[in-house]
Image: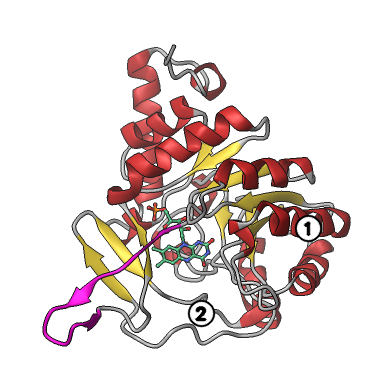
Amino acid sequence: MVASGTYGWGEEAALLLDLDQLGAFVTKTVTLKPRLGNPPPRIWETPAGLLNSIGLQNEGLKVFLKKALPIFERFRVPLIVSIAGESVEEYLALAEALEDEHRVNALEINVSCPNVKEGMLFGTSPRLTAELVRNLRRATSKTLIVKLTPNTGEIKEVAQAAENEGADALSLVNTFLGMAIDLRTRRSRLSTLFGGLSGPAIKPLALRYVFEVYRAVKVPIIGMGGITSGEDALEFIIAGASAIAVGSASFRRPDAPLQVLRELTSLFEELGVKSLKEIKGSFQYE
Ligand SMILES: Cc1cc2nc3c(=O)[nH]c(=O)nc-3n(C[C@H](O)[C@H](O)[C@H](O)COP(=O)(O)O)c2cc1C
């Protein structure tokens, strides 16, 4: 899959790669109202990674339904729509608006959005995540994927809360909070204090979270974080991922997800692996 936020809503992606070869297309997060995002600069390249503070820039639900969704009528690729809100009500309004859209196969719940009332990120708290997923489960018949943030000391508890309230799958991880300082101005390299770190720099951290969450839940996991090759992807599968997503690698190679898929296919052949199921979660550690 492509990771949310790295291939927009499909318009440009369709020009860059054959979408129908993907396991699924995950959209940039859609919010109820349009969002301008943070002012520039909002991308800073780091050794083996990328700090971003896009701030969920997007044109909002109405434009998504009118402009972006029809693009997918031309493709067969399963479509996963990422949504985020600042309150449970906003998430519900998004889920309800997408419920009757036949082209939408699943919702990915981006819980890395601050709850306006409580002032903390939904995904940092097992309690807030449980409340959100409980409400969403009642509001949608679509496959419900909860995307976890690593910026909490309680990722396993958040994962279990999502599973207990009816999440069908989990995606992990979103970006890790980081910062970079301009030595001349002594200010942040970004317009915000912190940004989200992605890319190869986070791969070992993401892999550890996938493994830990895999041991704590039964629902399938979509693993991501720094995957740039078939070997990276296979590590995530052995750690317990049922599917993988590629994000930042596409900034170097727009067809990176398909390249990873090709490499993974030859690795399966080379290692004599017949199916993903056979190797998933087969990490030897005892
Ligand atoms: C520029 C950029 C924008 C992103 N936007 C979103 C987003 O809108 N929603 C979301 O859930 N994740 C977003 N992410 C996080 C990615 O989906 C992914 O979880 C993370 O980057 C780790 O994967 P990677 O190392 O392969 O990029 C974004 C990442 C980047 C680099």
Q: Within 8 Å of ligand 1, the CB of disc 1? A: no
Tell which of 281 and 276 is nearer to you.
281
Q: What element carries label 1?
A: helix
Question: What is the C-alpha distance between the residues marked 2 and 1?
Answer: 26 Å
Residue at position x 31%, y 83% from top? 41
Tell which of 189 and 13 is nearer to you.
189
Residue 232 locus on image (x, y percent): 34, 36
Give the quarter of the image for residue 197.
bottom left
Q: Please say whether residue 178 is one of the residues in the magenta stretch.
A: yes
- Kind of residue at disc 2: Gln
- Give the residue furthest to the right: 138
Residue at position x 33%, y 40% from top? 204
Residue 104 in view of the camera: no
Instruction: Please give the label number shown on residue 57.
Output: 2
- Give the residue furthest to the left: 184
For the C terminus, the image quarter is top left
> Going from the N terminus, do you reach mark 2 or mark 1 first?
2
Q: Residues within 10 Å of mark 1 (few under 14, many from 20)?
A: some
Q: What element carries label 2?
A: loop
- Kind of residue at disc 1: Glu
User: How many marks on residues?
Assistant: 2
Residue underneath mark 1? 131
- 41 is higher (above) or lower (below) than 237: below
Tell which of 32 and 128 is nearer to you.
128
- 261 is higher (above) or lower (below) than 80: above
Write down the region rendered in magenta.
175-188
Please say if the residues under marks 2 and 1 sit with CB atoms less than 8 Å apart. Answer: no
